Image (tube, rainbow, N blue to C red):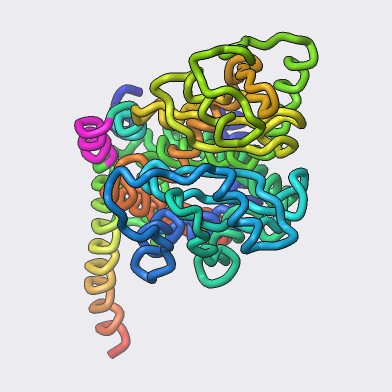
Amino acid sequence: MQAVTLRRWGWVHKWSSLVSTLFILLLCLTGLPLIFSHEIDHLTGNEIEAPAMPEGTPRAAVDRVAAEAVKAYPGLVPLYFFAEEDAPDVWYVKLDTRVDTDESESTLILSDARTAEVLGAPNFDEGFMSVMYRLHVDLYAGLAGKLFLGFMGLLLMVAIVSGVVLYAPFMRKLRFGEVRQERTARTRWLDLHNLLGIVTLVWALAVGFTGVINTWADLIFQAWQAEQVAALQAGETHVLLAADASEAPAADGSLQTAVDRVLAAAPGMAVSMIAYPGTLRATPEHVAVILRGDTPLTSRLTQALLVDPANGEVLEAGARPWYVTALQLSEPLHFGDYGGLPLKVLWALLDILTIVVLGNGLYLWLKRGATAEVRA
Amino acid sequence: MMRIWLWPLVVAVASIIGLVAGLVSEGAGDWLSWLALTAPVVIGVHGLCRYRGRSRSRLLTSAEPRQAGRS
């Protein structure tokens, strides 16, 4: 590589790293406990669980779950029902003052899916884990904070790529993994920076880039909603179950019947989420029912169907666009929650190695004066 | 060129396999994913330990002549 090219890449690496380092360090440090948030909640007793009941206890209609939730939280309206794959007996219900808020002040509660009883509200807004979460996700600054952290993530991508370009010239005379001991402390730090940087490369790129995509989640859902509404208005929809189809219970305006009709139209799928009309995930007139498959991959890649609660017609407004697929694949790849506890431990170790790379990169920059003197 | 990139490439491929395997299959996929992602972790931690070991031994050897010079 020519000296000029090398200097240019060095400049790119230096500045992309310097600008983002402190924020990326913050993300790595706050991300560490977040990897284990499920386990931590479980250990600290913060996890709310549904009481044990005989298997096959019938489930309450979602309308009743919604009514009980509203009774417990007067003045609020339900926006979404979420179903967790590993907790089939509870519904997470998100409530807010209106269906079309930005949801930053929304309340999330847990309801028993069989009795419709409100089980409680997880303490997402206070305590250590909540501080970690907010510092990791939006710096307490809403969408602006998310997009800012996303930009820092993009700078990290630039730093990683330029670091890889610089790796070869620095390693010309060295064996892989060599940490020269006979030289100055700075040289040994540089060798360690190169080694740890290159081994964490793919993981850091994957987690970093999927993190950036996650910061765009709100915008992605807005775009998808706009696309669905446009498809509906243009009549470009695919009817899965006609309003007068006889193979499903007739629509009666209730949410439960609407959901049942969606399930009748999509056999083999399970409900992942129900969105009320007017929310970010639905359209102004339709309930959106987000379905998931039952394999590890299809349980992440969901299918969104729209149902008109008044006449029971089930529609699909276009297939899932590529950017929603990208977002849905980004979530597990960022969280590391798809391979049990061992994968989380590996995630944490790789995170710690990344912290070392960032820290000693910063050290190398701070000590740059020392080598300049040595060279002179 | 090959000498420089061989090991980084091996680690990168192992990482990719590790990231994808657990996502596409449960059970065997999880095991493959744990195994493959252990590669970057082990090499990284090994490098870290060696760095610390060497800097400690360096401190020990460099302390003697300095003291000798002072006396």
Task: Residue at the far bottom: name it.
Answer: B71
The spot of residue A16 in percent (x, y) is 63, 44
Name above or below for residue B67 compared with residue B30.
below
The spot of residue B4 in percent (x, y) is 33, 30
User: Which residue is nearer to you in this view: A296 or A29?
Assistant: A296
Residue A220 visible, this angle: no
Residue B49 visible, this angle: yes
Name above or below for residue A25 compared with residue A335.
below
User: Which residue is nearer to you in this view: A37 or A144?
Assistant: A37
Q: Main secondary structure of the magenta part?
A: helix
Instruction: Write down the region rendered in magenta.
Output: B26-37
Choose top left, top right, bottom left or bottom right for residue A13: top right
User: Which residue is nearer to you in this view: A309 or A360?
Assistant: A309
Residue B4 inside the magenta-drawn segment: no
Q: Is residue A18 left or right of residue B43?
A: right
User: Which residue is nearer to you in this view: A209 or A321?
Assistant: A321
Q: Is residue A236 left or right of residue A257?
A: right
The spot of residue B52 in percent (x, y) is 28, 63
Say which residue appears at 25% left-offset and 36% top-offset: B30
Choose top left, top right, bottom left or bottom right for residue A259: top right
The spot of residue A119 in percent (x, y) is 48, 62
Name above or below for residue A369 compared with residue B23.
below
Say which residue appears at 36% left-offset and 54% top-offset: A348
